[in-house]
Amino acid sequence: MSTIREITMQVKSDSFKMAALDNDTRNNALQAIIENLQAHKAEIFAANAEDLKNGEINQIPQPVMKRLKFDEAKLADVCAGMEGLQNLPDPLFRVKLERQLDEGLIMRQVTCPIGVIGVIFESRPDALVQIAALCLKSGNCAILKGGSEAAHTNRILFNLIHEAGVKAGIPEGFLTLIENRADIGELLKCDEAIDLLIPRGSNAFVQYIMNNSKIPVMGHADGVCHIYVDEAANLEKALPIIIDAKTQYVAACNTVETLLVHSSVAAELLPKLSDRCKEVGVKLNDCPRAMEFIEGVPSTEEDYSTEYVDYILTVKIVDSLDEAIAHINHYGSHHTDAILTENNEAAEKFMLLVDSAGVYQNCSTRFADGFRYGFGAEVGISTGKLHARGPVGLDGLVTYKYKIFGHGQIVGDYASGKSTFKFKDL
Amino acid sequence: MSTIREITMQVKSDSFKMAALDNDTRNNALQAIIENLQAHKAEIFAANAEDLKNGEINQIPQPVMKRLKFDEAKLADVCAGMEGLQNLPDPLFRVKLERQLDEGLIMRQVTCPIGVIGVIFESRPDALVQIAALCLKSGNCAILKGGSEAAHTNRILFNLIHEAGVKAGIPEGFLTLIENRADIGELLKCDEAIDLLIPRGSNAFVQYIMNNSKIPVMGHADGVCHIYVDEAANLEKALPIIIDAKTQYVAACNTVETLLVHSSVAAELLPKLSDRCKEVGVKLNDCPRAMEFIEGVPSTEEDYSTEYVDYILTVKIVDSLDEAIAHINHYGSHHTDAILTENNEAAEKFMLLVDSAGVYQNCSTRFADGFRYGFGAEVGISTGKLHARGPVGLDGLVTYKYKIFGHGQIVGDYASGKSTFKFKDL
C-alpha cells in the first residue's frame, strides 16, 4: 500500500495534466458524474442508512444526524449544483491582462488551476460532492478527508464520482479519498505536493491545521459576527434581521454573536428584542448599560470574542458609530458584520472601516454563503485577506501565470538603452 | 520605549484609517515625498557616504556596495517611479463584481487595502522608497526592516518620507522603520497586527521567515529558472538569450540555472554555447550526454535544484518536450522558465504544463520583474500560487470585501421559499 506521501506525489503529477483539460472535458465529466450518482442512488441511500444507524447507536447529536442524512432531496440538490457548474463560465484560460511590453514582446496574465487542494470537511456527504465538483470544474486535483460518521456514504460517493470522472477522460488523481483520521497528520507534511489546504470544522481543529503545516491554509477559525443597530436604524426592520441572524441556523459561522446598539435607540429596541428572544429561546448576555433595559446574564470581556454556536447573544450599548467599528475590528473575526441604518453615509463609513470579508447594510449576516452570493457553491469561507476572501467559489480555486511571447528579446538591450519598453495594454 | 508588539498594534489601528483615504490624498502625499527627498538630497547623499565608508571598512563585496550606493541617478529613478505611481489607476475602491442577489439586495465586491505589511529587504536604499511608495499608493501601512549596511541612508529616507506623508494627511502609522535585527523575531510573532510578510533576501533567510511565523508570507526562496532549447528552436536567437539570462545580472532570482537542450540540436548548439561561455566566464556543469559535445564539470542531482548566484550553468540533454517539462516541474522553483522554439504548439504545451509564475517563449528569463512587466515597481516576486504570483505590484497589495446593501432581507424567507434569489450581474 502506498504511503500518503507517495499518493500525494502521484496526485501532484496528475495535477499538471489537469491543467491542460478543456472546459468541455471537465463539463462532460460533471455530467457523467451526475448520471452515475443517479444510476446508483439505491446503493448510496443504503450506505447512508448504515451511517445513520451507526450514528444512532453512537448517540450523535440531532443537528449532526440531520447533516449526515443523504436522501433523494440532497441528491437532487447536488446534481442541480453540478448542472449549474456546467453552465458557469470556465474559470481557466481567462486572460486577465494582455499587455505589449515592446513591439513583438507580448505578455498575457492567464488563469490556471492552483494544483492540488486538500479539503478536510465535516460529516456532510453533500459537501464531498460539492467540493469534488468545484475542484473538477476549476481543473484542480482534490484530496478529501470527510467526517468519519459519514464513512460509508463518503466511500460510495467517492467511488461513483471517481469512476465516472476517469471514464470521462479525467486523470486518476483528480480525486482522492483519505479515510483514516491518522493520515491527516501525514497530509499536513506534504507541502511539496499539496498547494492549498481548506479545513472546515471547529475552531480548535482549524487552528490546529493552521499551526501545524507549511501548506497555505484558506478558511476561518472563528465566526464572531456582529450587528450594529445605528441611531438611524429602522427598528421595525432590525428585529427580524437580528432574530434571523441569530437563529436561522445557530451552528453556522455567519450567525451573529454580538449585538451593538446605539445608546439613543436602546430604550426602544431592547425591551422588544428581549421579548422576541424569550419567544425563540435566545439567552442574552448584557453589558452593564444594557442591564438597565433588559434582563440577562452580565457579559464578560471573553464573551466579546466567543463564537457561541448556541442560542446566546451578547448585547452591548455603544455611543457612536466609531465605537461600534472599533469594537468589531478589535473583538471580531473579520468574517461578516452588518450595520442597520437608514443613513447611507453611516453605512458607507461602516463598510469602509470594518475590516471584514463581508460588510452588510440592512440584511442578515446569514447571507454570507457561496450559494447566496450566486457562486453555485463554496469550498469554504475565508477570513484571511490573501487570495480569496469570504465565501470561496470557482474564482478562489484558480491562480494565474504570466506568459510572455518574444522573438529573441534580451534584457541587456533594455538595460543598455538599445531597446526601450513600449507598454500598451491590448 | 514601546515594544514591537505595541508599535504594530498602533500601526494596525492606523491601518483602518488608511483604508478610507482617497486617491488624491495618497497621490498628493507621494508628490510631497518626492519634493521632500529632493529638497534634502544633500543630507541623503551624506548619510549614504557614511554607509559606503563603513562598507569599505567592513570589506563588503563590490556587488553589495553597488546596490548600497544611493546617488543622484538612484534618487531620480525613485522619484520618477513615484511620479509613475501617481498616474497609475487607483487600486482601491474598484468594483470587481456587482450583482443583484434579489430585487433590492445588491452585492458589490470592492477592492481594499490588505492592511499592515511587513517587508524585510536587502541593503538597497532605493527599495525602501519603492516599497514605501507602493504601500502608500495601495492604502497599506508598511513596517520596514532594511539591511543594516544601509542604516544611515535608510534612516534619513524614512524620516523624510514619514515627515512628508504625515504633513500631507496620512496617518502616523503608515510607515514604520525597524532598525534592530533582533526585532525581526518579535515582528514574526505579531500575527494579530501584521497581515502579510514579504521577506526578500537569501534562500535561507526567506525559509527561516516562512518556517517561523503564522503570518502569511509572500515571496520566493529559490530562483531555479530554466531555459529549454526545443528541437524547433532558432539557434541564432538561442545563444544571446541564454547568455543574457545567465550573465545580465548573475545575482538575480530570475537568472537561468539549468539549460535543457533537445538531443536533436545538441551537436550544433553546445559547441557554440561552450565557446561563448568561455568568453564571458560562465562555467558549465554537464550531464553525461552533454560531456560528449563540450567540456565541463560532471553535474550532480544536486545541481538541478541549486540556485548558483554565480557564473555557473548546468546543461542537460533531454529527448522530448515532455521530459523537459517533467524536469522543470520536478527540480524547478516555479519562478520563471522559458522555451526557445519556433513551434507555437510546443510553446503552448510548455506554457500550459510548466507550473511556474512565468512561462516564456523566445526571450530571456530576466524579464521577470515588476518594472519590465509595466507595474511601475514591485515589492517582490512570489513563487506561491495563492494571492499574487510572479512580480508583485499594486494589484498584489490589495484584497477585497463583499458589501451587501439590503432593505431588511432575512435568510429565513429564502429558506422557506417565501423569497427566491434572482441573481443578475449588473
Image: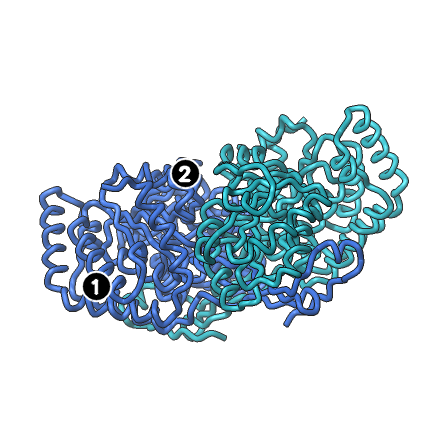
Chain colours: A blue, B cyan
Residue in view at x 61 percent, y 31 percent: B184
Question: Residue under mark 2: which chain is it in?
Answer: A
Comes first in the chain, label 1 or label 2: 1
**Amino acid carrying mark 2 in the image:** Ser
Residue A131 quadrant: bottom left
Residue in view at x 54 percent, y 32 percent: B208
Pointer 2 residue: A213
Q: Quadrant of the C terminus of chain A?
A: bottom right
Q: Is residue A228 above or below residue A211?
A: below
Foreground mark, 1 or 2, reads 2
Pointer 1 residue: A74
Front residue (pair A93, A306): A93
Asked whether the viewer can see residue A324, the reply is: no
Front residue (pair B137, A46): A46
Question: Residue under mark 1: which chain is it in?
Answer: A
Residue A328: mark in rendering: none
The kind of secondary structure element at disc 1 is helix
